[in-house]
Amino acid sequence: MMLFRNWVKMDWIQLKIWIQDVTGLERDALHIYAAIAIQLCGVVLFRKSVASALPWILVLIFAVGNEWLDNGQTVHVSDLSHREFDESYKDLWNTMLLPTILFALSNLFPHFLVGKQRLSENMTNEILAVDDENVKL
């Protein structure tokens, strides 16, 4: 089991290093971009808006999972060194900040993100039906 855990950790770290090399982005920037991408994928996957908690929770699950893999599947926070804990805290902060802002803004100020709401097809059809009845020839 330990061999498998070490293999997963090394493979995960190598994948992250490869992504850094290919994109030329720093680790912190990758956390931010990945978080937004995961949140938007959650919006599509769950067919919910950014105002829904599900896409935000999906980002949180990925962020915690990433930190768990980064720290060698450490079970207890007390097993982390002070430096590892600080680094994980910073990574979680970077990862969750923009998804949290988008989630909060979309709930507190929905028109800020989407503008004016469009008429639904039903409302449009009802308006057209009323206009047809009121037309005098």
Image (cartoon, rainbow, N blue to C red):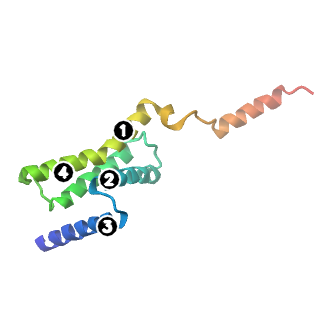
Are the two marked residues, 2 and 1, in contact with CB atoms closer than 8 angstroms?
Answer: no
Amino acid on which disc 4 is placed = Ser
First in residue order: circle 4 vs circle 2: 2
Coordinates of residue 28 in the picture (x, y in percent): 28, 52
Amino acid on which disc 1 is placed = Ile
Are the two marked residues, 3 and 2, in contact with CB atoms closer than 8 angstroms?
Answer: no
Determine whether, in the image, residue 5 is placed left or right of residue 30.
left
Q: Nearer the viewer, mark 4 or mark 3?
A: 3
Mark 4–mark 3 distance (CA, rounded to whole Å): 21 Å
Mark 4–mark 1 distance (CA, rounded to whole Å): 20 Å
Secondary structure category for the residue under label 1: helix
Disc 3 packing (10 Å; few <14; some 14–19; many ≥20): few
Screen quadrant of the N terminus:
bottom left
Q: Which mark is residue 88?
A: 4
- Picture residue at 44% right of the left edge, 49% below the top: 43
First in residue order: circle 3 vs circle 1: 3
Coordinates of residue 66 in the picture (x, y in percent): 24, 57
Total of numbered circles in the picture? 4
Q: Nearer the viewer, mark 3 or mark 1?
A: 3
Q: Nearer the viewer, mark 4 or mark 2?
A: 2
Query: Circle 3 sits on which residue?
Result: 21
Query: Circle 1 sits on which residue?
Result: 101
Mark 2–mark 1 distance (CA, rounded to whole Å): 17 Å
Mark 4–mark 2 distance (CA, rounded to whole Å): 15 Å
Amino acid on which disc 2 is placed = Ala
First in residue order: circle 2 vs circle 1: 2
Coordinates of residue 137 in the picture (x, y in percent): 93, 27
Q: Which mark is residue 29?
A: 2
Secondary structure category for the residue under label 2: helix
Coordinates of residue 93 in the picture (x, y in percent): 25, 44
